[in-house]
Image (cartoon, rainbow, N blue to C red):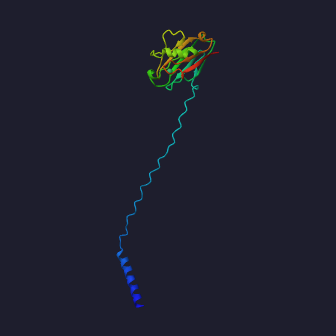
Amino acid sequence: MKLHSTLLAASIALTLAACGGAEAPSQAPAAATPAATEAAPAETAAAPAEAAAPVETAATQAGECAFNLESNDAMQYNTKNIDVPASCTEFTIHLKHVGSMPVAAMGHNVVIAKAADAAAVAADGAALKPDHVKEGDARVIAKSNMIGGGESTSVTFEVAKIAEGGYNFFCTFPGHLAMMNGTLTVK
Ligand code: CO
């Protein structure tokens, strides 16, 4: 019994000693908190591409025997048809290039010819700078100058020359015919 008490006392003493010696500084530096989480990159949704403006909206009839036609840097006229009153002796198409690209890169003109001849007229003028229309081309009823961004021109023709129908207006700048081509409707 006595022995047991002694062992117990020793055990207590060891425990105290251990505790006493364990005076480790308690000011453990606070664990560095991980850097503030970076703001999640905002995945900004790509803005939906603006749909091209409708082709017909800006076209305006500029009076009984004339039409204000616009063209742009996207290789477009702003209408696919121009009504030509049969009551007019002459008809004028005023062409404005509302873009900013130079004539050498995005030139536009207005050429009047049978729809069936348009491709050949444009092909024959492809290499002929700056107007891209063969001189004296008998298939051509009328043609304007070739213009660049910010410029305007006009072309006037006798309505009797297109009275039979089937005529188109188009641009002969190389590569533009497919996009820049519309009908002339005498009515
Ligand atoms: Co053109």
Q: How many marks?
A: 0
Horizontal side of residue 20 vs 145, given as left or right: left
Q: Nearer the viewer, residue 110 or 115?
A: 115
Residue 56, how many percent across, how many down? 58, 25
Residue 160: image location, x then y, percent: 60, 9
Q: x%, y% of residue 146?
A: 48, 17
Q: Is residue 18 left or right of residue 148?
A: left
| In the image, residue 1 above or below residue 145 | below
24 over 117 or under it: above or below: below
- Residue lying at the far bottom in this picture: please name it: 2
Residue under the image location 55 percent in, 16 percent down: 118
Q: Quadrant of residue 105?
A: top left
- The extreme right residue here reads 187
Quarter in which the N terminus is drawn: bottom left
Residue 187 lies in quadrant: top right
| 107 sits to left or right of 57 | left
